[in-house]
Image: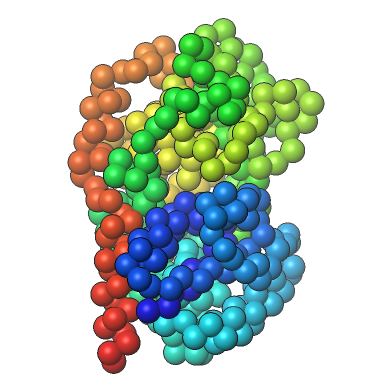
Amino acid sequence: MRYLFDILHPAHVHVLKYTMADLRAQGHDVVVTARDKDVALDLLDAYDIDHTVLSEQQHGSVNLARELVSRTVKLGKFARSQNVDAMVGLMGPSIAPVGRILRIPSYVLYDTEIASRTNTWVYPMATEVITPECYTGRVRGNHVTYAGYHELAYLHPARFTPDPAKLTMYGLDLDRPYVVLRLPSLLSSHDNREIDTPPDTWLRWIEATSETHRVVISSERPLGTDLDTYRLEGPPENVHHVLAHADLVMGESATMATEAAVLGTPAVLVGATSRGYVDDIERRYGLIRYFTPDRIDEALITARDVLEEPDSPAVAACHSQLIDDHIDVTSWLTDHLLTASSDSARR
């Protein structure tokens, strides 16, 4: 079988990289198309994943629409030229229509209910929509679920072991406890309702937190002079080692908050919108605490309370339970794709 994987975002590289490798190890061909967004291409290069760039991220609704049309046309031509048997991707705005037109099975993974406009027209065109069991959005189409989160495709203990030696790449070590503040770009289409916290709020929190912890900022957006001195510098492919050894991950990224949680690091998330997986982790394990922007003061107090009890046995127990309750998502996904695509080929 020949599989095409379509990468639209840096997180998609992490979610799919091991499935690509597993399929290749089992003798299947894998080709990769990519979108130039943030550090997506850097990650593909770091993992030695050959890829063909079809588009560069645009900004604004009109330009985004033009990009989508252009890359969908290019994807169709590429898929036909490569004689692919199946296409896989997160969100799926290009693989679903191309798959429908060219009669190539398309497998769309997603976990973000608030991307409702895209989901409404993508899902019915996909061969399968694959979501975590905790996904709360409506799926019109063939819906398949699994017991896990996207982040367990690459951070499950079967796939990832935190290495404190990697911290030196970022100027960090275990002798001084630290906190990661994550500030995403908020330029994705599903982020249009998000409101970034004023920089002076974060600066006041950093100054108060620095009495006991070093604060480093992982950011996709300009920070300004006062905050830029805290920017985390280092190879993006190793940032999960940083999250695993932090005492707290704070900020506005649902993905990084979830990455922290599945690594056993408490997270405090501030955002206008939540996600099914965020709510699930908060309700069942308490490893994420979610606050809307109007409750920012509560979020900062909660972060302070977490840092007063680092290495809490309760946190460790909750993390252990989270892992026990869920699967190695990559193993499941690889097996599922092999079965589903073989069934499609026989029809």
Image quarter of residue 155: top left
Residue 247 in view, yes or no: yes
Q: Residue at x 40, y 32 (%)?
A: 162
Which of the two residues, 322 or 271, is positioned nearer the viewer here?
Answer: 322
Q: Is residue 325 left or right of residue 242?
A: left
Q: Is residue 15 left or right of residue 280?
A: right
Q: Is residue 246 left or right of residue 161?
A: right
Q: Residue at x 73, y 59 (%)?
A: 59
Q: Is residue 96 above or below residue 202?
A: below
Split into 4 quadrants, where in the image is the N terminus? bottom left
Image x and y of residue 307, in percent: 44, 16
Q: Residue at x 20, y 41 (%)?
A: 324
Q: Residue at x 24, y 47 (%)?
A: 326
Image x and y of residue 137, in percent: 38, 62
Image x and y of residue 22, in percent: 35, 61
Counting labels gives 0
- Residue positioned most to the top: 211
